[in-house]
Image: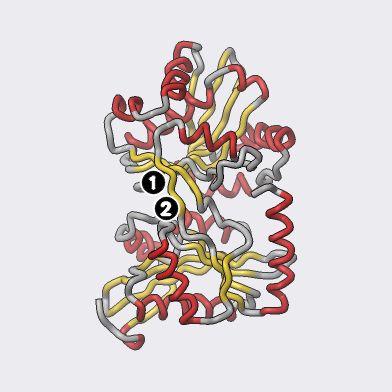
Amino acid sequence: MSGGIADFSITDATQQDWQQALLAYPEANFLQSWRWTAFYEARGNTVLRRIVRQGTEVVAMWSGIVQDARRGRYLEIAGGPLLDWKHQALADVVLRDIAQQGKHHHCVFVRVRPQLHETPDNETLFVDSLQRLSHRVRRSPMHLHAEHTNILDITSDEETLLAGMRRQTRYEVRRSARRDVVVTSRPAAGNITTFYDMQADTAQRQGFVPPSRSFLETYAETFGDALQLYTAEKDGVILNAALVIIDGPEAVYHEAASVPQARKEPGAYGLLWQAIQDAKAAGAKRFNFWGIAYTSDPNHRYAGVTTFKRGFGGQDVSFIPAYDIILSRPKYLKNWIVETTRKKRRKL
């Protein structure tokens, strides 16, 4: 692809244009979906959806959410922008547009985490692009939406998927059926109270801050049938619950909850196996377990759940970490201090 800056045009996207253009980027997931920004728009956030064309061809796209935090307003772009990063002129145009939009909306900084696998070459490519835009760039003190995750290719048949699991995981999946654990799914919309109550209890036991009821309700309403509530039940008691996005080429195990009795039963294994089967039947190519520890430190907040997720046979995937384009240096310093302290406190 060739072309100078003058060859590109940038417009706000319609829903039809966005969804059509997104098909050209199979690496994208729900973070760059129309639904994700529509969800935040319904919660009162300003959202941006931009398409870059060269002539009539779409060559890049990005969506972002303006977040109003006490530490400072910022523009968040997770899983994007989507483009060929080797095309320097295009990368320059896209990043300039992102920075301009951040300034227009009076943001202190822009946080960007592209859907690029973390390799030395990719990070150099991305950081060089940022530094051509501005010297006021630094690595973000906080992660942005599962930079480290585990992803399972689900294009194989079910027997092959079972064979690829860790032996103990495969045993627990089969034991779930023998123990008469019943796994069901239904659209999360209209059923979110079940999940909210269980996750609130889980959060209290495990020491994290869960999403609010209104957050989950709007999330479920916006995603519709693409967001499924899975439950694992035994003897009339719901042991485990999860919110799973099944939409397009990637399914995502996004939120989970359990009750104390769940430790004695393999419900979580049966639940995930059913979700994987359903995602495969719906045409998904991969299953994202959404968030693992980036270190083997047993004290990491995600250490236990990381072992559980890896048991299903997926591959660890790390994306380029988030970087911040600093638009107001004095105000950004306050944000940096707050987030650095928060990261240490949360053992992330």
Which of the two residues, 109 or 316, is positioned nearer the viewer here?
A: 316
**Rendered view: 235 above or below 148:** above
Q: Which residue position holds label 1?
A: 250
Q: Which residue position holds label 2?
A: 29
Q: Position of residue 247 (x, y in %)?
A: 40, 46
Disc on res. 282: none
Residue 302, image quadrant: top right
Helix, strand, or loop for circle 2?
loop
Residue 34 appears in the picture as rendered: no
- Which residue is depicted at the point 61% across and 76% down? 326
Residue 23 appears in the picture as rendered: yes
- Which residue is depicted at the point 34% across and 88% down? 6
Helix, strand, or loop for circle 1?
strand
**Rendered view: 147 above or below 113:** above
Q: Position of residue 283 (x, y in %)?
A: 31, 41
Q: Amino acid at mark 2?
A: Asn
Q: Amino acid at mark 1?
A: Glu
- Which residue is depicted at the point 58% across and 12% down? 235
Within 10 Å of disc 1 (Cα), the crowding (few <14, some 14-19, many 20+) is many
Does residue 202 appear to the left or right of 266 in the view shown? right
- Which residue is depicted at the point 35% across and 81% down? 89
Q: Position of residue 303 (x, y in %)?
A: 59, 38
